[in-house]
Image (cartoon, grey):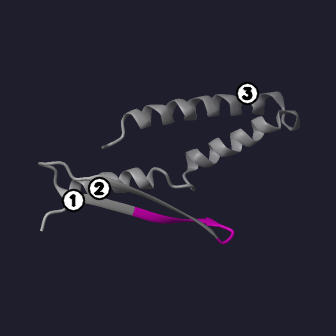
Amino acid sequence: MKATKIYYKKLFNLGNFQNEEIGVEIEVEYGERAVDVLQKARQFVNGLDPKNEKERKYNEACDILKNKNAWNYQRVVEAEELVKQYEADKERVEEELPF
């Protein structure tokens, strides 16, 4: 038997009776081992975990920036820096996808 595609998905519990299912399908290229492709798929999906601490902080910073008047100047500046760094990191990661 030869694996030609790997599909990996995971159901993330968001709390409050909500879930999010994230998955990816990757073709197994000639010379690749299916187990290695599965590991890459798992890493990719787990990196998108909605409860990821960085993503949680990013979402919190976005909320602060939506209502700047409710926060002090320092907190707004910190939120702006966090959003800028997160988006730069995300762009870099998207360029380095494992497949």
Q: Residue at x 87, y 38 (%)?
A: 70
Quarter where residue 20 is shown: bottom right
User: Badge 3 is on which residue?
Assistant: 77
The secondary element bearing badge 1 is classed as: helix
23 to the left or right of 51: left
Q: Position of residue 1 (x, y in %)?
A: 12, 68
- Disc 2 to disc 3: CB gap under 8 Å: no
Q: Position of residue 62 (x, y in %)?
A: 70, 39
Of the 4 image quadrants, the one containing the C terminus is top left
Res 39 label: 2
Front tag of 3 and 1:
1
The amino acid marked with disc number 3 is: Val
The amino acid marked with disc number 1 is: Val
Front residue (pair 26, 59) = 26
Among numbered discs 2 and 3, the one appearing first in the sequence = 2
Q: Is residue 32 above or below residue 18?
A: above
- Disc 1 to disc 2: CB gap under 8 Å: yes
- Disc 3 to disc 1: CB gap under 8 Å: no
User: Badge 1 is on which residue?
Assistant: 35
Tell me which secondary structure the magenta stretch mostly adopts. strand
